[in-house]
Amino acid sequence: MMNESIFKAMSDQTRRKIIELLKEGPKTAGEISEHFSSAQPTISRHLNVLKNANLIIAQREGNFIIYKLNTTIIQEWLVWLFEHFGGGHYEKEK
C-alpha cells in the first residue's frame, strides 16, 4: 500500500509545481523559490513535505542543498495509481 504522505504531498498545487520544476533537473531552494511569490520559509516547508514523502532527495553540496526527484518513488506511485484507478478497469457512462 502506498504511503499516505505521498498523497498529502501531491494534494498541494505548489508541491506539484515543485515536482514539475525538478523534472527539468536538480535545483537549490533559491532556484525553486524564484518560481513562486511565496516567502522562502513557505517553500522550505513544502520541500520538507516532499522530502518526508520521499518524493525528493536533498543533497548538500558545499553551502547549498540541492533538491532532485526521487524517481523510484514517483514511478512506484504512478504504477500504484494506474493499477488502482487506470487502465480501463471501469466502464464509461453512456
Image (cartoon, grey):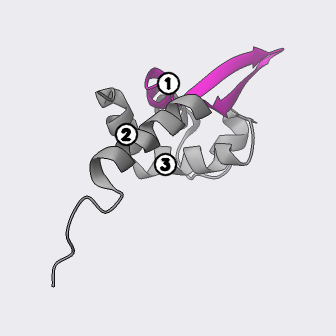
**Residue most extreme to the bottom:** 94
Residue 32 sits inside the magenta stretch:
no
Q: Nearer the N terminus, badge 1 or badge 3?
A: 3
Say which of marks 1 and 3 sits in front: 1
Position in image of residue 68 (x %, y %): 67, 32
- Is residue 11 visible in the rendered image? The answer is no
In which quadrant will I find the N terminus?
A: top left
- Residue 16 is tagged as 3
Q: Quadrant of residue 67?
A: top right
Tell me the amino acid under the disc marked 3. Answer: Arg
Query: Closer to the camera: disc 2 or disc 3?
Result: 2
Residue tagged 1: 54
Please identify the quadrant where the C terminus is shown: bottom left
Marks 2 and 3, the one that precedes in the sequence:
3
> Residue 30: percent from the left, percent from the top?
70, 37
Residue 74 placed where, x, y %?
A: 51, 37
Tell me which label, 2 or 1, sits earlier in the chain.
1
Q: CA distance from mark 1 to mark 3?
A: 14 Å
Q: Amino acid at mark 1?
A: Asn
Crowding near pointer 1: few (<14 within 10 Å), some, many (20+)? many
The residue at 44%/28% (across/down) is: 49
Which residue is label 2 attached to?
A: 80
- What residue range appears in magenta? 49-70
Please state if 88 lies on the left or on the right of 76 as rendered.
left
Q: Secondary structure at mark 2?
A: helix
Q: Looking at this view, is 93 or 74 the one in front?
A: 93
Q: Amino acid at mark 2?
A: Trp
Say if the magenta span includes residue 68. yes
Q: Rounded to the nearest whole Å, what is the CA distance between mark 2 and mark 1?
A: 15 Å
